[in-house]
Amino acid sequence: MSLRLFRASWVVPVSAPPLADGVVAVEDGRVAWLGPRGGLGMPDGVVTDLGTGVLTPGLVNAHCHLELSHLAGRLPREAGFVPWVEALVDERGREEPGRVRERATEAIRELETTGTVAVGDVSNALVHLDLLQASRLQAVVFYELLGWDPARSETILQAAEQRLAAHAAGVNGRVRVRLAAHAPHSVSARLLEALRERGGPASIHLAESAAETGFLADGGGEWAGFLARRGLGDVAFRPPAVSPVKYLESLGVLVPGLVAAHCVRADREDRALLARRGVHVALCPRSNRNLGAGLPSLPDLLADGVRLCLGTDSLASAESLDLLQDAALLHRAFPRIDPSVLVRMATAGGAAALGLADLGTLAPRQRAEMAFAAAPSRLSDPCSFLVSGEATLKPLAA
Ligand SMILES: [Zn+2]
C-alpha cells in the first residue's frame, strides 16, 4: 500500500512536543514517519493538506455508557445524584429494546464524528456489542455487576461469567468485554472480593457523590434511604467508616489497571493510594457538574501522580459525547493547568487506561487513528485551542 502524507499547520503527537507545519506519513494504517514538513527523512507520497488546524491522535473516552443513550434529557439532574440514580433505575427498562439500540447507534456515531477512536463502555445488558463491532471504534466493554445483597454474590458472578463466555465467541478483536463492578455502595464486599479473586473488577465508579462517602462513613444518609426503597434496607452492612478509596484498598480491589470513574472525593491519602496501586482515574467533569457532585481536584490529582484520563459518562448525565468538551470544562475550571496535560488525558491517558498502547499518541508504528480540528485562524498554541471549547475534532480517514 502506498504512503500517504497528512500535513497540518500543527501536529500534536502527545508523546512529543507539538510540531508546527507538521507532516504525518501513514502506511498500512500505521504511522511511518512524522516531523516538520521537509524534515530529515520525510518520505515521498501523496500529500493531503489539511490546512490550518490541529492534527492529533484520535480521542479515547475511558468512561461512557452507550446503552443509556436513550435517557438523554429524561432524568432530573437538579436534585442531585441519588434522585438521578433513582430515576435512572426506574426509567432504564421502560424503553423498547429497538429504540435503545437505535439511540446507542446514534451515540456510537457521535463518538466517531467527534474524533473518538476508542471507548471504555460500561454495560449491564450487553445488548449492543454487535453495534460496537460494526463501528470503527475500538472498545473495551466493562460488563458491570450490581449486587448489594452478599448472599447473591456467587449467583450473580456465575451468571455473569456464563454470559461472558457465551459472548466471547462472537466478539472480535475490536471489542473486548471485561467484568466490572458498579460502585462501593452498590456492590457487596463479598462480590467485590469474589471479583478480586478473578483479577479484580476492570472498572468501578468511585468517590463520586456525597451520598456514597456518607453511606460508607456511617451507613446512613440519602443512600440508605435509596436502598430501603429498593427493598434492600435489611441487608446487613457494617459501614467501614473510611473513604470509598480506602474501603476498596481494604478489600484488595485497587488493582493495577483498574479504571475508576470520577474520584471527585479523594483526599491526599486516597490520591497517594490510587497512584501507588496503578489505578487509572477517569474524570467525567460535565457529568459531575450536572449532578451537583462538584469537580475533581485536578491540580491535586496531578501533583500526587495519579494516572488520569477522561470520560464523558453517559448521555443521561452529560450533554454530548464530545470528549473535548470535558477537557474544555477542566480548562475553564483550572486555567493554570497546562492545556497539553488535558490533551494527554483525552488521548494517551485513556489509551493507557484501556490497555490500548498503540493508540493515543502519534509516533512511528502507532496506529494512524487520527483526528483533525480545523482552526479559523493561525494558532500560537495548538493545545490551548483544543481545550478552548471552540475546537471540534473530526475523524481522519487514513
Ligand atoms: Zn458512569
Image: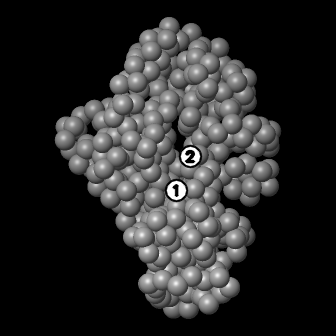
**Residue drawn at x 63%, y 55% as measured from the top left:** 349
Considering depth in this image, is 366 or 293 the residue closer to the camera?
366
Give the numbered dot on residue 354.
Answer: 2
Instruction: Say which quarter of the image contains residue 99.
Output: top left
Q: Say whether residue 125 is left or right of residue 79.
A: left
In the rendered image, residue 341, in percent from the top left (x then y), is placed at: 68, 65
Vertically, is 363 above or below 252?
A: below
Task: Report the quarter where the C terminus lies.
Answer: bottom left
Residue flagged by tag 2: what amino acid is it?
Answer: Leu
Secondary structure at numbered mark 2: loop
Residue placed under numbered mark 1 in the picture: 60
Task: Using the image as rendered, state which of residue 231 and residue 32 is in the foreground.
Answer: 32
Tell whether label 1 touches label 2 (CB within 8 Å). yes
In this rendering, would 323 be left or right of 303? Answer: left
Residue 245, image x and y in percent? 69, 33
Q: Is residue 181 above or below residue 327?
A: above
Q: Amino acid at mark 1?
A: Val
Residue shown at 60% from the left, 83% from the top: 42
Left or right of 395, for residue 203: right
Q: Earlier in the sequence, mark 2 or mark 1?
A: 1
Q: Is residue 275 above or below residue 377?
A: above
Q: CA distance from mark 2 to mark 1?
A: 9 Å
Q: Is residue 86 visible?
A: no
Tell me if residue 135 can be seen.
yes
Few, some or many C-alpha atoms within 10 Å of disc 1 (few <14, some 14-19, many ≥20)? many
Which residue occupies the foreground of this view, 271 or 48?
48
Q: Measuring 37% from the left and 56% from the top, which residue is drawn there?
A: 136
Q: Is residue 110 left or right of residue 292?
A: left
Residue 48 in picture, x, y percent from top left: 44, 84
Give the residue displayed 65% in from the left and 45% down from the top: 280
* Circle 1: element type: strand
Q: Check the image and report above or below for 157 versus 386.
A: above
